Structures are given as structure tokens and as C-alpha cells.
Amino acid sequence: MARKPASPPTAEPSVSAAPADPRRLVVGALFKLAADRPWDEIELTDIATEAGVSLAALRNLFPSKLAILGGLTRIVDEAVLAGTSDDLAAEPARERMFDLVMRRLDALTPYKEGLRKIMPVLRRDPLTLAALNRASVNSWRYMLASVGIPTEDRLGPVRVQGAVLLMARVAETWLDDDEAEQSRTLARLDRELKTASWVLSRAEDLHRLTAPLRGLARALCSARPRVRRRERGDADRRGEDYAPAI
């Protein structure tokens, strides 16, 4: 019996590389341009060209240069949250915060040169700083939650805004710290964490001390409308003609 000719080997299906995230391309393009030229000279067309997207596509991705800066926050958030583990879950909050800030700085490192040029310009624009602060507050809610620090209780807003300020101060030193050991950054972070711990401790003490006053204020505010309603009800009844019961 004649042998059947051997079937040609089946070619392995080619695995194409996953398409690059256009948002990441745009963010990377902006910071690459910012490292080489002044912020005010970077046009939207420059960003689109550098990222390899059309201006229409850029408009669909981001409405403005400021929004692209916000895109960096999202990229860093994703990187930090993806790298979160339970290794430090039993450590004090200060140690968890130290690790969190350093991991965030690591995620920012590819964009450091651009940030170094952009930040002095943004600090002179209060409206831009206010918008960036709102984005940072949203970001740090997730950052603190990832290391088990409460954000939704009465002192949650204090913790979140405090973390935003702490990160901003440490980043000032980090942007000028080019040492491999980052000794200046580590020292600044250590000082800022000590200050934040002291401030939060005082805020917690104040919150406990004012608890009776807050309770009294709530009681007074809730009682006054009832008194007014009762007074109005008495006045209404005095002027009513009650129909006889049937």
C-alpha cells in the first residue's frame, strides 16, 4: 500500500504584537516634546505628529494639553495599583506610605525630564494647579485605599489632600535628584511623612475633642424646624373650623 505523502507542516499562526495604547502614545509624545522645548511652544499638532495620530484622533482622546497631563496620572495609577501586594499589610501606615510614594516615583521616572521642564511653568498658573489638584485628589483616594488607609470617614478628605501635598513636596526634590541612591528624595520623604503623621494626629485629637459640640449643633439644628412646625400647627388649628364628626 502506497504511503500517503506527508502533509506539509502546519505553520504556526503569527502572533502580532498588541497594538499600542494611543493614550499612552500621546502622553509619551507630550513629555518627549516637553523635555526639548518650552511648554508654551508645544502645539496640539506637534503632539499628534509625535504620537503618530491624526489631529481628529487626538481630539477624541484628549480635549487639551492639560487633559494629557491628567492622562499621565491615570497611567501612573494603573502601574502602581497593578504592583500592589500584601507584603506590607502588617506594617505601620508610615511604612506603607513610604513604599507607595517610592513606587509612584518609579512609575514617573520615564517622564522625569519632561516633568522637570513643565512643573515650573504650571506652578505659575493657579487655575491649572487647581485643576491638577482635583485630578490628584481622585488619584490619591485609590492610592491610599490600595495600602489600607481609610479615605471615606470624616478625616478621609484630610488624609487624601495631605497625601497630595506630601507627594508634591517630595516630587520637588525628586525632580532635582539625579543620584542613583536618591538620598535627597528619601530624606525629604522621611521628613514629610513625620510632618504628616504629626498633623494627622492633631486632626484626630481635634475631631475627638469637638465631637460633643458637633453633636449639640446637630441636635439644635434638628430641633428648631420641629419647633417652628409645631408653632405653625398650633396657629393653624386656632383658626380652623372643625367639621363635626359624621
Image (spheres, rainbow, N blue to C red):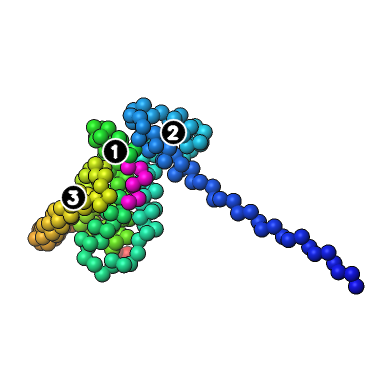
Asked which secondary structure carries label 2, the reply is helix
Work out whether residue 180 or residue 61 is closer to the camera in this orientation and state it.
Answer: 180
Left or right side of 155 for 2:
right
**Could one spot residue 14 in this view of the protein?**
yes
Picture quadrant of residue 96: bottom left
Q: Position of residue 26 (x, y in %)?
A: 44, 39
Asked which secondary structure carries label 1, the reply is helix
Q: Is residue 40 magenta?
A: no
Q: Earlier in the sequence, mark 3 or mark 1?
A: 1
Q: Residue at x 33, y 29 (%)?
A: 38
Residue type marked 1 = Arg
Alpha carbon distance from label 2 to label 3: 34 Å
- Looking at the rendered image, the quarter that the C terminus falls into is bottom left
Category of crowding for the residue at label 1, using alpha-carbon neighbours closer than 10 angstroms: few (below 14), some (14–19), many (at least 20): some
Residue type marked 2 = Ile
Residue type marked 3 = Arg
Task: Residue under label 1, please give it.
Answer: 116
In the picture as drawn, the residue positioned furthest to the right comes out as 1
Task: Residue under label 2, please give it.
Answer: 47
Q: Earlier in the sequence, mark 2 or mark 3?
A: 2
**Could one spot residue 225 in this view of the protein?**
no
Residue stretch in magenta: 106-112
Task: Residue under label 3, please give it.
Answer: 188
Q: Position of residue 110 (x, y in %)?
A: 37, 45
